[in-house]
Image (cartoon, coloured by chain):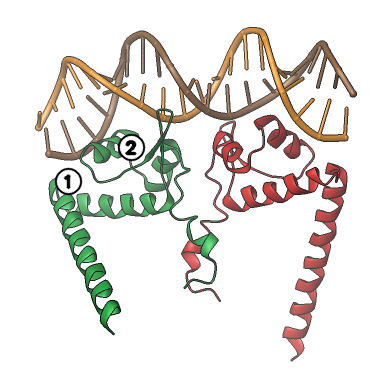
Chain colours: A red, B green, C orange, D brown
Amino acid sequence: MTAHPQEDHYKYKKVISIGVVSELTGLSQRQIRYYEERKLVFPDRSKGTRKYSFADVEHLMKIANQREEGVSTWEIRQEMTKELRERMLKGQMNAHFRRRS
Amino acid sequence: MTAHPQEDHYKYKKVISIGVVSELTGLSQRQIRYYEERKLVFPDRSKGTRKYSFADVEHLMKIANQREEGVSTWEIRQEMTKELRERMLKGQMNAHFRRRS
DNA sequence: CGTGTAAGGAATTCTGACACG
DNA sequence: CGTGTAAGGAATTCTGACACG
């Protein structure tokens, strides 16, 4: 599917500490941890300390933009689960049509 | 040139701490720091602490393989500078032919 | 609700050195 | 030469709480 399957997961590998994420996003560590509490981000934990991926960083930047526009964390969360449902539906449909065509 | 110019530098962005690099490569922190001393890797420094890229991680894995084959750090270094010279030459030639064709 | 901050502790990283070989 | 380790300190991260609004 992709030209460089390995490179692809550079984006998703959770290796970045919160300090670096803070620098990259311009968000405070407090904000980043709070967004986790509100279930907007899901870092890995390596013995207590949080590890984020580049995808997480991008996602946090989107969140930062939405927050600036006055969107609440609750609304952002709603939007996320909604998109998730849509993606799952699409997956279902793909599986469905793949089976019978 | 590339489909996703931004994604591309996920590979080169120096954001990974030495502990994670150690886990990723299987090398000890001592080894990783020593290879830096021998000028085989060049992490960024953010206020003292080293930050590596995924490219650095890959490079360290190659180094680990060479070391297992008995190649000395000095020889690895030689090989690196040699490759660098070749790449620079190629750049020169590209510039040269670009100018006159 | 969303974020700042001070507090105390735990985990991480750093350097220079001694050791072995 | 290449790597391990103990040592002491510095920087990072963590949690729970109080504050403001």
Mark 1 or mark 2: which is in front?
1
Mark 1 to mark 2: distance in Å?
16 Å
Residue D2: x and y, percent? 19, 39
The residue drawn where x is 23% and y is 43% is B39
For residue B28, the mark is 2
Q: Is residue A37 visible?
A: yes
| Dot 2: chain letter | B
- A18 and B5: which is toward the camera: B5
- From where the camera sits, is residue B70 visible? no
Could you tell me residue B101's position as x and y percent? 29, 85
Q: In terms of depth relative to the viewer, which is nearer, A21 or A39?
A: A21
Kindly check if marks 1 and 2 are in contact, taking CB atoms under 8 A apart as contact: no
Which x, y percent locates residue A74? 87, 44
Q: Is residue B15 above or below residue C15?
A: below
* Kind of residue at disc 1: Thr
- Left or right of residue B93, residue A42 in this image: right
Q: Mark 1: few, some, or many residues within 10 Å (few <14, many ≥20)?
A: some
Task: Write down the quadrant of residue A90 in the picture.
Answer: bottom right
**Same chain shared by disc 1 and disc 2:** yes
> Dot 2: few (<14), some (14–19), or many (≥20) neighbours within 10 Å?
some
Q: Is residue B55 above or below residue A38?
A: below
The type of residue carrying mark 2 is Ser
Q: Quadrant of residue A1?
A: bottom right
B49 or A2, nearer to the observer? B49
Q: Residue furthest front?
A: B100
